[in-house]
Amino acid sequence: MKVLILAGDGIGPEIVGQAEKVLDFVAKKHALNISVDRALIGGIAVDETGHPFPAETLEKAKAADAILLGSVGGPKYDLLPRNIRPEQGLLAIRKELNLFANLRPAQVFKELSHASSLKDELVAGLDIMIVRELTGDIYFGQPRGIEERNGERVGFNTMIYSESEIRRIAHVAFQAAQKRNKRLCSIDKMNVLEATQLWRDVVTEVAAEYPDVELTHLLVDNAAMQLVRAPKQFDVMLTGNIFGDILSDEASMLTGSIGMLPSASLDENNKGLYEPIHGSAPDIAGKDIANPLATILSVGMMFRYSFNRNDIADEIENAVKTVLSQGFRTKDIATKDEKVIGCKAMGEAVLAALNA
Ligand code: IPM
Ligand code: MG
């Protein structure tokens, strides 16, 4: 198994450092042959090569079975031209590797439910899986640009989805629902947007192949409202790229701990890129206070989805639950009377729990 590590910017190197220790530990424990390589992405890649997704990184990413990514971006890069902004590195790797299926679980850990901005009873036990299409939609649609029309500047992007793009992500979502509580809610804006009328039509067609899954549809504005009104009504949510971007940030906040949530971005063959859903947090970079748990849980997802080792994924998730129940907290998830530890110490606590 070849793992490529892309630490990226900001807190990326620190959190990935702790996740790598977990990867090493389980590899030894289970006598797995895992080789680790490293490459540049994002702002650090711009600094060193002039491009956020250098050719060498693409080559290594293609050769890898799975990729672990920290985070990209930072204020230092805000003035760069759009085509070499750090985020372009992320968009490029998704597109080049055809990582169309983005799985974003939003789970409330029982020790942390008080940290949610919603009332405890609304979120206790919450467990939603957002399946977001990641390589289409207005993110990649043509035409796009800013140009002069009738004496003023006009900015434009195109929302576009083909039937085959919708169908393949729908299958991923139905299959995820089959493994969970067999409920799938598909999100669109069919009352206004043709691209999402097609979305609803195709998802409804695919549903015929999954009679055991209950399919519902919601308009995206209503879905955003339902997520804060009664989030536990959802099991799997299926969305396009832009709606999924927005709804997954909203869902993450329900859990009260954006520093806890991992994600997977998969291609047709379950080759995947794994990353925490939070950003590069430049304000706390290099201070050993970042929370490495989302990245550690991303390693868990790597074992579940790319390496087909649910047993190891469970071990990692259980170790994270153990450290939470032992009362270990990084600053972002601590309430006032809890003892705060740093990024490194949190990584070590997880290793100790894995060892126990
Ligand atoms: C995300 C991020 C990215 C996105 C940005 C950084 C390009 O917000 O992964 O959700 O919009 O997809
Ligand atoms: Mg986002």
Image (cartoon, grey):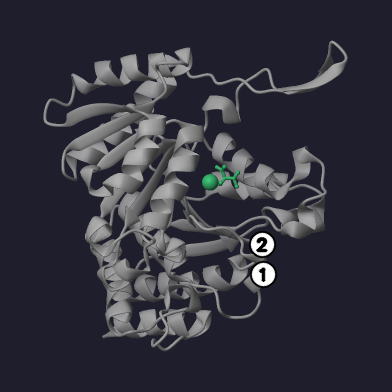
283 and 211: which one is in front? Answer: 283
On the image, the x and y values in percent for residue 23 come to 42, 69
The quadrant in which the N terminus is found is bottom left
Q: From where the camera sits, is residue 111 visible? A: yes
Q: Residue drawn at (48%, 71%), measured in percent from left and top? A: 292
- Can you say whether 142 is above or below 52 in the image? above
Neighbor class of circle 1 (other Cα within 10 Å; few <14, some 14-19, many 20+) is: few
Q: Residue drawn at (48%, 19%), measured in percent from left and top? A: 161
Image position of 97 (left or right of 169)? right
- Can you say whether 254 is above or below 241 in the image? below
On the image, the x and y values in percent for residue 257 come to 42, 64
The quadrant in which residue 166 appears is top left
Image position of 65 (left or right of 151)? left
- Can you say whether 164 is above or below 318 in the image? above
Q: Mark 1 sits on what residue?
A: 283
Neighbor class of circle 2 (other Cα within 10 Å; few <14, some 14-19, many 20+) is: many
**Label tally:** 2
CA separation in Å, label 1 and label 2: 12 Å
Q: From where the camera sits, is residue 307 visible? A: no
- The response on whether ligand 1 sits within 8 Å of label 1 is no
Q: Which kind of residue does numbered mark 2 sit on? A: Asp
The quadrant in which the C terminus is found is bottom left
Quadrant of the picture in which ligand 1 is shown = top right
The secondary structure type at the circle numbered 1 is helix
First reached walking from the N terminus: tag 1 or tag 2: 2
Q: Mark 2 sits on what residue?
A: 9
- Can you say whether 220 is above or below 52 in the image? above
On the image, the x and y values in percent for residue 11 come to 61, 68
On the image, the x and y values in percent for residue 225 come to 36, 39
Q: Which kind of residue does numbered mark 1 sit on? A: Asp
Q: Mark 1 and 2 residues: CB-CB less than 8 Å, in contact?
A: no
